[in-house]
Amino acid sequence: MAVLYVVATPIGNLKDVTHRAVETLSSVDIIACEDTRTSSVLLQHYQIDKPLFSFHQHNEHHKVDHILNILNGGQNLAIISDAGMPGISDPGFLAIRAAHQNGHTVSVIPGPDAITTAVVASGLPCDRFTFEGFLPPKKGRQTRVKAIAESDITSVVYESPHKLIRFLEMLNDFCEDDRWVCVARELTKKFEEINRGLLQHVLEEYKQRPSIKGEIVVIVAGKEYSE
Ligand code: SAM
């Protein structure tokens, strides 16, 4: 039986790759990438030259059979995404489940992900938290934001820069009192920003900015939290 390696890659800073990730990507027969052009930058940086194929949210169902054929043929395969841990708001889950169901070994090579980096950086309680991933753009969005506002524990949300203000406004509408939040932007990159404070203040600050760019995680403290 072959091995499906699930390899975490940097969320910004190329130096955040682990030794094991480089070793593993150098030793497998083939690598499934979310976007072969994006991953080529990382792979070339570490002089890894392996056959690649693309495996992304629009072809994930279709490519699972291809992955199983490779594993059934005895070849080891690694999955990587554009950034962080495959399967976390990224393709991976279907292939991992199929590999388990077909008796192959699944081996995760841990490394960076935006969730833990952001929640730890926030200085908000991280003993328990809910990972909300990306909220739905329309239907069901209000229900999810209301649940975050009512949660007793920290929530972690992946948000795009152009929806940040709308998200913070909706959250503010559902929060009975002001709320501790943190906007973690461009983590591990040149313009990394950890912007924590009370929601109304943080919201007003972003409204003053001419534009908001980059990758963002919003951390929302539980409703009883204060400092
Ligand atoms: N698989 C990734 C992980 O392990 O975190 C997540 C991929 S998801 C498609 C991309 C989202 O993750 C971004 O929109 C943002 O919310 C978050 N993210 C990824 N890299 C980030 C970074 N360097 N700084 C802040 N947020 C980041």
Image (cartoon, grey):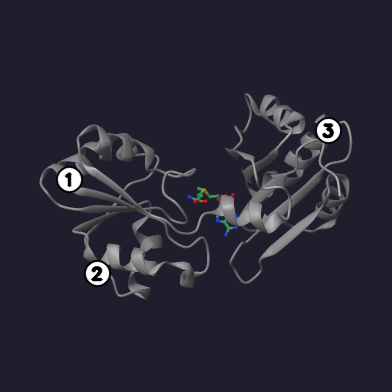
- Within 10 Å of the Cα at label 3, are there few (<14), some (14-19), or many (20+) other Cα atoms? some
Q: Residue at x 65, y 55 (%)?
A: 120
Separation (CA) of disc 3 from disc 1:
49 Å
The mark nearer the N terminus, 1 or 2, is 2
Task: Choose the circle earlier in sequence order: 3 or 1.
Answer: 1
Placement of 188 over or under 63, stated as above or below: below
Q: Does mark 1's beta carbon lie closer than 8 Å to ligand 1?
A: no
- Percent across and percent down for residue 227 are 86, 50
In what element is the residue under mark 1? helix
Q: Say what amino acid the circle numbered 1 marks.
A: Leu
Disc 2 versus disc 3: distance between alpha carbons? 51 Å
Q: Amino acid at mark 3?
A: Cys
Q: Which mark is residue 175?
A: 3
Reply above or below: 198 against 117: above
Which numbered mark, 1 or 2, is in the foreground of this view? 1
- Give me the residue at 33% from left, 68% from top: 22
Image depth: mark 2 or mark 3 in front: 3
Label 1 to label 2: alpha-carbon separation: 20 Å
Q: Secondary structure at mark 3?
A: loop
Q: Residue furthest left?
A: 73
Residue at the spot x=64%, y=40% of the render?
129
Residue 210: image x %, image y %? 79, 59
CB atoms of marks 3 and 1 within 8 Å = no
The first of marks 2 and 3 along the sequence is 2
Q: Which residue is mark 1?
A: 71
Q: Which residue is mark 2?
A: 49
Tell me the quarter of the image containing the N terminus.
top left
In this rendering, position of residue 222 left or right of residue 92:
right
